Amino acid sequence: MKLTRSYLVLIFFFTLGISYAQDGKMEENTLATEKSKDSIPESKLIATTSIIDTVKVDTTLILGKSIAIIDHIEVSEFDKKWLDSWKNNVIDSSLVIKPEDTLGKLVIENFTTEQLKERIAHLDSQTPFNFEYNPSLEKIIKHYLKNRQQTLANLMGKAKYYFPLFEEHLAKYDIPMELKYLAIVESALKANATSRVGAKGLWQFMYGTGREYDLKVSSYVDERCDPIRATEAACQYLSKLHGIFNDWDLALAAYNSGPGNVNKAIRRSGGQKNYWNIRHYLPRETAGYLPAFYATYYIFEYADEHQLYAKNDVLHTFETDTVVVKRQISFDQIHKVLGTDTELISFLNPQYKLKIIPVVKGRDYTLTLPKFASGSFVSNEAQIYAYAEADEAKREKPMPKYFEANDRIRYRVKSGDYLGKIANRYGVSVNSIKRWNGLKSNNLRVGQRLTIYPKRAVASSSTSTQKKSSPKKSAPKGKYSTYVVKKGDSLWLISQKYPKVSVAQLKEWNDIWSTKSLKPGTELKIY
């Protein structure tokens, strides 16, 4: 995903326009209504307003147009002052593009080996890592500077958003701040990055390691791609590895290849514990892992000296805020009500695989938005959820069912099976099955056992039979009160009137499985 600076500036000022239009607000709303009328056939505009969850909403909302949302001007001013105070403290020159500088400059001109040695010695004096000069490291640094200028500039733009988040967690676990550069080596700061062996996210967690650190994977969410949860897990894992080896270089090598490979390399080297002495006994990828980390560390610390500046920066972390969602909602629904760009929502919330935020018991899933948009979301939360429910009610195809991939399974190949059939059964790809099992072709044999990490719940035949024969679940017995549905009511709004009552319970108690059946005058049992 590429978000240009000019594109994001337009989004930002569009949001500001909504938040701060005071004298011209009525005029804006009138113009928006007229524009909507021009773009929709008159036959669809017979009814000017409809009641949705006790909020008067223009019927054009249901047709996917904008809604005049509530704003709290004074609170928006508080937000503006808070953001301005942070912006005034941003003094990192590497985040500013100087007009006189271009990426076309030869950034390694007059850059000598002696200069590099001096700079590395200076960095080594400030870090717990064994940052030593060697010719191979010099080659990597100069290669990056000469051939990856645009990539480095883009990474610096992303770092503006991610690094403050990383630093907060690194400080919490008393881990060296330099480890923020590890995420660049792991994923190039791509929150949805996937390796050839299935590792995912900014910190490249494999499925099993992710589960060990409470990173859930479901049909809706892959928490390995959640910047906050994954960074917390990475800090815990790195702390554990450092506790084992008592050396940050070895801890990083173990993060990449596993503690077992590092231990074998130490044994093969005759007991050496310096990374540079055991490097040739490590897997090939890990042998180049730390040099890449050190090269990145050097370039970011000496970016100004090499005339490297951030490009395509998105937002500062402090320009965003998070909201815990109380109802399942999609990025598209948020966009239609708030006008926030869907690409920006996707960048800020990369963990949601289907661009839908679910509500799951025992798991608080949040929505990250630009500061002003988050204020609008909170001020209009009931309206937004009401719109989401109305939007889902008119869908022909229901939302995908939530399913959590709790663990791997072992599947035994039967007669008539082929990889495509098995992949479809468990909601995974053929390439994933081949990768998990080291298969080089699509050929299978009867009786062969396959390891699968399912993304779809599949009941066994015995379970299915049992479900068919089991009686229908009856409503609970005992005292209950009655609620008469009013015009504009929704199951979510009704559930909010009763503590400890959920939408699912209302559906079960009253045998309601479609919001279309919720009509004024209907009597609902509340236990």
Image: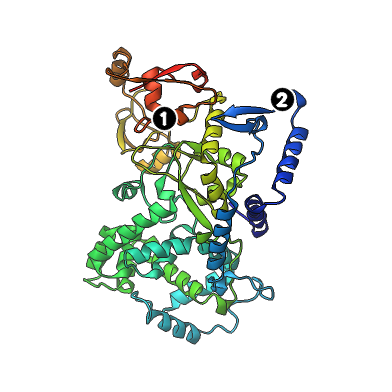
Look at the image and tell me whether residue 182 can be seen.
no
Position of residue 345 measured from the top left corner of the image (x, y, whole percent):
55, 48
Residue beneath disc 1: 495
Residue 396, image x and y in percent? 56, 23
Depth order, front residue of 36/28: 28
Q: Is residue 327 above or below residue 249?
A: above
Apparent side of residue 477 relative to residue 391 in the rendered image (left or right): left
Which amino acid type is marked by label 2?
Lys
467, above or below 201, in the image:
above
Label at residue 124? none
Q: Secondary structure at mark 2?
A: helix
Residue 482, image x, y percentages = 39, 19
For marks 2 and 1 on the same chain, the one whose residue lies earlier in the sequence: 2
Is residue 343 toward the left or the right of residue 521 in the image? right
Decide if residue 330 is in sight here. yes
**Left or right: residue 365 compared with residue 468:** right
Give the residue pinned by disc 2.
44
The kind of secondary structure element at disc 1 is: helix
Give me the residue at 41% from left, 28% from top.
503
Task: Name the image quarter holding residue 314.
Answer: bottom right
Residue type, mark 1 in image = Ser
Image spot of residue 256 (x, y percent):
36, 59
Please give the name of the residue rendered at 46% of the width and 64% of the height, measured from the top-left corner. Answer: 164
- Quadrant of the rendered image containing residue 278: bottom left
